[in-house]
Amino acid sequence: MAEHAKRRRLAKSSDVSDASTGPNTFSSTPSTPVNIDDKLNWNGFCEVESEPNFGVSGVKVQEVVSLDEEILNDLPRPVYGFIFLFKWREDDPDKQEQRCPEGVWFANQTVNNACASVALLNIVNNVADIELGDNLQAFKDFTEDFTPALRGDAIANFKFVKEIHNSFARKMDILNGDLQLKNEAEAKKKGRERTSSAEDESIAGFHFVAFVPIDGKVWKLDGLERQPQNLGVIENQDWVLQAKPEIEDRMAKYEEGQIEFAILGLVKEPLSGFVSTLARNVKSLAELTKRLDSLKPDWRDFIESSVNVDRVVTENLVTGPDAIYELTQELIEQSQLAQSLEDVVLHDVAADIMDCHQKLVLEQTGLRASIIEEQQSIRSDQERAASRRHDYGPAVEALVDILARKGVLKDMVV
């Protein structure tokens, strides 16, 4: 992930050398965690193990644990793209387009360690029906007519993306990044170049590649390749199953027992859909209740006496705005009733309306459970992200120092 962007680097070696000195000196002592100022003032990109969150509305990154068709079918729809994390191996350059096609937003990775951000941007900038937010939308508009290489340079200098990407940086990440740039600059000055592809592969890092449906075709967007790769026309309206063989082919190249890859799906965030469906459910129940009150005022007694009614379900029924489920009065008022339900409301047979009412009550039980589950998933993701951002290095250093002073490490040192 960190070794191959140099093939398209536009900065001079002197610029790289200067980037690892002076301005990047830590404002804090070596034994303290990296602070916000250190991250903001650093010129590089840290190596990350997870996907940065650029605040795009209505989307989430979800781990894909398997490419089994059943697992893929369970992904929230639509699936906007896949991010494949693997140990980088150069693909056949003849598979690439001669130039970036019109309508495909594709950026090269021109700086080390930026591949996670590049892969995400190569997906979200090709999705028409999501809200990018002011910063990303302005960036997309600004780079619309750029070449892939110029877009990559624009990403490298995009403060908004760099700050979010480097929010995961720890002090050792920054030190390693600066050391790598320094070593590369020194090697370039001495004229050292790698000539062996075997050597190149042996030191290859992990890399993020995007797979995206664009204008009826599936594309592989690899920032380390000069141009995008067209994987074919989408058939049967399901691009996910069409991208599956391409990813499986890459996975099959690893020796048995090696697990050196991961798959992430950029999907529609399901929580808002669950809440919208709950709003329609609540409004529908209110309309049915109003109709039943006019037709059969004692209908509630009949429902409560029914052996098929679960009292817990009925007692926990949501009938209006509820902060627990992020349900507002505005959402309820804006929701549209299904035509089939409007037809039921016009019925004069109370039994038919009560039957529909009970079906909606049971439906709501599942909706509430889905909302709570997704809320918990979001909190877990936020906690994991906070944990990844925490710099544990100084704590480990302090612990080792204590063990050394107590003589515990004496017998371990060779």
Image (cartoon, rainbow, N blue to C red):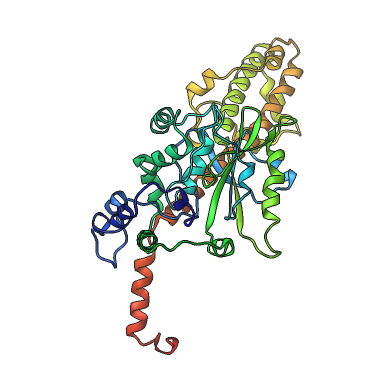
Position in image of residue 382 (x %, y %): 46, 48
Residue 404 quadrant = bottom left
| Residue sitting at x 69%, y 45% | 246
- Asked if residue 305 is positioned above or below residue 66 in the image, the reply reads above
x then y, percent, for residue 316: 59, 35
**Number of numbered discs overlaid on the protein picture:** 0
Residue 85 spot, x, y in % from top left: 57, 52
Closer-to-camera residue (285/103): 103
Q: Quadrant of the C terminus?
A: bottom left
Question: Residue 153: x and y, percent?
Answer: 40, 41
Viewer-closest of 210 and 172 = 210
| Residue at 65% in and 13% down | 291
Query: Horizontally, is 245 left or right of 144 in the view?
Result: right
- Residue 373 seen by the camera: no
Residue reaching furthest front?
191
Residue at the image position 68 percent from the left and 32 percent from the top: 362
Task: Note whether 55 is above or below 35 in the view shown.
Answer: above
